[in-house]
Amino acid sequence: MTETLQITDIPVAGYERVVRGIDPSCGLHAIIAVHDTTLGPALGGLRMWPYASEEEALFDVKRLSRGMTFKSAVAHTGLGGGKAVMIGDPKKIKSEALYLAMGRFIEAVGGKYITAEDVNTSVQDLEIIRRATKHVTGLERKDGGSGNPSPYTAYGVFLGVRAALGWVFGNDSCKGRTVAIQGTGAVGSALAKRLVEAGAKVYGADRNTERLKQLEQEIGLIPTGEAEIMTMKCDVFAPCALGAILHDESIAALNTPIVAGAANNLLLEPRHGKALADRNILYAPDYVINAGGIINVSVEFNPGGYDEKIALGKIERIPQALKELWTIAKEERIPPSDAADRLAERIVADGRGAKKATSCGVPPKGQPRSGG
Ligand code: NAD
């Protein structure tokens, strides 16, 4: 029932478009934030969360969509940044009607926003959304999608961990190195497997003790306490659970020369990038090292469709991107997290400049003026 869906714009400075979608017939209350489409359509996952208020949801969707612009820019996915959130308790409000309404809402944004999986949204939910809009990615391979992104994220993080080892110790081998993984979920467990195969001694902490036990039996992971994982002496601390875990207290207690993991928004505040650098801890900026998943999804836009080889080739550039950032950080005496933000902003600004020049008839750098 399209007519029950009410769409209203929420003007937000610095964002191309932020819209609210409400459909009382099925309890939909959602926000889509299109942060920036300079480099391509805004791709970002759809999160369902029991936000206490629309204000809280708006804060989150703004933060997350901007993060997607930065992540995609540095990973050169050819995509912009966006995100969508649905307000509600997933245990209570999930229904077919709700996802169909969300699909109509996405369709109404006209392809500027493309959705994908995120917290509390499954591939099955995306299948329902797809009945109402074509702007959906991350479906299963059999349905022409790129499938589960987690193994690709884990692969990128694994390569990033090796790059960090090489940077700090002058040798990127995992043999004999100790890695402490916080959160052995989809990404953390795949990362643990790769690290063990490469000869590392892997410690893991997770609230899901069953999963830990299983990994202990399967690959010899050493189950570790939740508090201990963040303070134990190790060569790499790999946070793969929650964001905002790097703050004054936790940074002071770290006993590692490297922090390199999959979780998003690891720094509680931007200044904590400097706090890590002040302790001489090498930080792999989160949205650079964990870009494997978005890179994999972005390959769905290839003219010939999804191709795993292309995805892997692009993911294998993550170590180079990290080394470039660490070099900039060293030369300019800034934290790697600031170097990443600067680089992302520059890539988007260059894209904006090139677009403007093209629309004014000025050829983009290196291209001849048509007819000239
Ligand atoms: P997941 O839900 O499968 O795994 C997270 C794990 O962390 C769970 O097993 C959970 O029990 C555990 N956990 C939660 N709180 C914990 C705590 N305090 N201490 C220890 N363990 C705790 O999620 P995932 O897909 O593996 O993603 C992990 C992180 O990486 C998330 O922050 C996610 O946003 C980020 N990320 C994931 C992808 C991807 O492709 N899945 C891509 C980019 C970033």
Image (cartoon, rainbow, N blue to C red):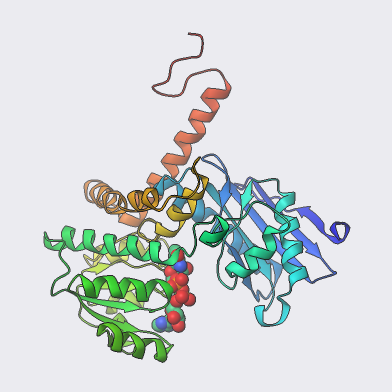
Of 229 and 126, the residue lying toward us: 126
335 over 179 or under it: above or below: above
Left or right, residue 40 beside residue 233: right
Q: Which residue is at a point 42% across and 77% down the rendered structure image?
A: 185
Residue 196: % across, % down: 23, 75
Of 177 and 62, the residue lying toward us: 177
Total number of numbered labels?
A: 0
Q: Which residue is at a point 22% across and 58% down the rendered structure image?
A: 163
Which residue is at the far right?
3
Of 91 and 237, the residue lying toward us: 91
Question: Does residue 47 appear in the picture of this structure?
Answer: yes
- Where does ligand 1 appear, by image quarter? bottom left
Left or right, residue 363 beside residue 285: right
Question: Does residue 63 appear in the picture of this structure?
Answer: no
Residue 11: % across, % down: 71, 50
Residue 278: % across, % down: 25, 64
Q: Which residue is at a point 36% across and 49% down the rendered structure image?
A: 314
Which quadrant, please, contains the N terminus? bottom right
265 over 300 or under it: above or below: below
Residue 86: % across, % down: 68, 67
Of 372 and 338, the residue lying toward us: 372
Which residue is at the far front?
142
Left or right, residue 252 beside residue 294: left
